[in-house]
């Protein structure tokens, strides 16, 4: 029975060369029955297992197998497919395609389109139990997970090769359910045409910076990076070209944005300022350490005395520097407070020359570091501009980026 969660959603399914390719036909059938518009890309090896006509019949759309088979002179097929997708599913995903994805190889229709898409990617691995457990495969899976790729874990059981173990492709119904869950997290702005940040460049910082004492010890904080990542995803979904400057985070990094890793406050300052002049919106959601060790030891400090005095010095103030340097940029800061939220937020907005400050009480239930929800108040020069209570961080990110788009448009309309 058709369900509304996938109705009208555009899904590209990549089928690779494994015996489990026959299950991909059932997956395409289920996605289509649930109302999705499904396009299929098959590798050369996949065609050895299942005929393209099978997928064409089930999806009611042409099947793509050759990157050089350009059917419409008005578009480049792999770019058109990449842009078309609300979701990209790879099932079955062999060790080979997983390695290509991890290392950015693009030598056929599927791998090239995967490299070009900004849609979320769902991967369903299927392979021999020893291949799946191989350190190289596991390293590639971890690398993709860090970039925000989602997975449907393979099942355990009798494999086509005769082994019994983990490596069997998840059932088509399970993969379809995972697709629904993933698309439920991602709003329909791109599909509905609501892209108020199209053509804009947005720089977002996320996570907790690390200030090293020696090669094995450092000062940091409890930030998970979830709020900054949610803002970056929201800006991407609303059409912006996004750079996420990420410190230490405990959440998957998003697809479809430029990721720049920064360990310390100094690293983050350099990364932000290198992109500042070209940016339209700068969002400093990272929890940057206020102090760092005055001396960073080149080798591990040995335990000697019962007490150790550590001298600290101030780190660079990234938000203040952004406020000082801004010309046309909209600068948004975050304030994690434990008391006097409004007074502290307004003071920070004025001192740092911000356009907006997003303040939250990190001691409130469901609003602190690591939580998936947040309760925030947004302040501008006139005081409290908005307040959002007990919402998923993803929803807060969307509301904030919509507000930023409105403020930017108003500013430009008022400019002489």
Image (cartoon, grey):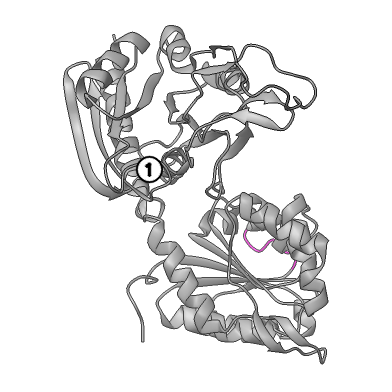
Looking at the picture, tell me which residue is in the foreground, 363 or 121.
363
In this rendering, is residue 386 above or below 109? above
Where is residue 272, by image quadrant?
A: top right
Q: Which residue shows up at 47% across the image and 30% down it?
A: 286
Residue projecting furthest to the front: 306
User: Circle 1 — which element?
Assistant: loop
Residue that numbered label 1 is attached to: 195
- What x and y, as percent, mark residue 285? 43, 31
Residue 282 in view (yes/no): yes
Q: Which quadrant: the C terminus?
A: top left
* Relative to 12, 197 lies left or right: left
Q: Which residue shows up at 40% across the image and 58% down it?
A: 185
- What x and y, as percent, mark residue 260? 62, 33
Looking at the picture, tell me which residue is in the foreground, 199 or 212.
212
- What x and y, as percent, mark residue 123? 62, 67
Q: Which residue shows up at 48% across the image and 42% down it?
A: 224
Q: Is residue 82 magenta?
A: no
Q: Which residues are magenta?
A: 66-72
Looking at the picture, tell me which residue is in the foreground, 171 or 202.
171
In this rendering, is residue 7 above or below 142? below
- What x and y, as percent, mark residue 137? 78, 63
The 10 Å Cα crowd at callout 1, few under 14, some 14 to 19, many 20 or more, is some
* Relative to 268, 233 lies left or right: left
Total number of numbered labels? Answer: 1
Residue 60 in view (yes/no): no
* Relative to 34, 96 lies left or right: right
Q: Which quadrant: the N terminus?
A: bottom left
In this rendering, is residue 222 above or below 108? above
The kind of secondary structure the magenta stretch mainly shows is loop
Where is residue 9, by image quadrant?
A: bottom left
């Amino acid at each position: 029975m058709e369900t509304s969660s996938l109705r009208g959603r555009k899904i590209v399914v990549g089928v690779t060369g494994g015996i489990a390719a026959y299950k991909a036909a059932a997956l395409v059938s289920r996605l289509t029955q649930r109302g999705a518009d499904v396009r299929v890309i098959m590798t050369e090896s996949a065609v050895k297992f299942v005929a393209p006509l099978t997928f064409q019949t089930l999806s009611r759309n042409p099947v793509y197998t050759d990157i050089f088979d350009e059917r419409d002179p008005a578009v480049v097929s792999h770019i058109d497919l990449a842009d078309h997708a609300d979701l990209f599913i790879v099932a079955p995903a062999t060790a080979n395609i997983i390695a290509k994805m991890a290392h950015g190889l693009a030598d056929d229709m599927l791998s090239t389109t995967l490299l070009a898409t900004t849609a979320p990617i769902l991967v369903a691995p299927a392979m021999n139990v020893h291949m799946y457990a191989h350190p190289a495969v596991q390293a590639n899976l971890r690398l993709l997970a860090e970039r925000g790729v989602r997975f449907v874990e393979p099942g355990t059981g009798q494999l086509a090769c005769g082994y019994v173990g983990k490596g069997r492709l998840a059932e088509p119904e399970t993969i379809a359910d995972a697709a629904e869950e993933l698309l439920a997290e991602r709003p329909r702005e791109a599909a509905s045409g609501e892209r108020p940040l199209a053509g804009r460049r947005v720089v977002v910082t996320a996570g907790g910076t690390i200030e090293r004492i020696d090669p094995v010890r450092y000062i940091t904080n409890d930030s998970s990076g979830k709020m900054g990542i949610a803002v970056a995803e929201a800006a991407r979904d609303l059409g912006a070209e996004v750079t996420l400057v990420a410190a230490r985070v405990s959440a998957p990094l998003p697809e479809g944005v430029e990721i720049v890793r920064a360990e310390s406050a100094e690293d983050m300052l350099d990364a932000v300022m290198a992109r500042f002049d070209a940016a339209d919106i700068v969002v400093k959601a990272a929890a940057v350490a206020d102090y760092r060790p005055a001396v960073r030891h080149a080798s591990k400090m040995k335990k000697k005395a019962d007490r150790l005095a550590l001298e600290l010095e101030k780190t660079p103030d990234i938000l203040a520097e952004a406020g000082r340097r801004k010309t046309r940029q909209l600068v948004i800061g975050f304030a994690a407070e434990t008391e006097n939220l409004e007074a502290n937020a307004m003071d920070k907005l004025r001192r740092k020359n911000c356009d907006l400050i997003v303040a939250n009480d990190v001691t409130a239930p469901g609003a602190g570091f690591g939580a998936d929800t947040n309760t925030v108040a947004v302040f501008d020069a006139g005081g409290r501009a908005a307040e959002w209570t007990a919402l998923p961080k993803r929803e807060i990110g969307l509301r904030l980026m919509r507000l930023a788009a409105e403020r930017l448009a108003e500013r430009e309309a008022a400019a002489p």
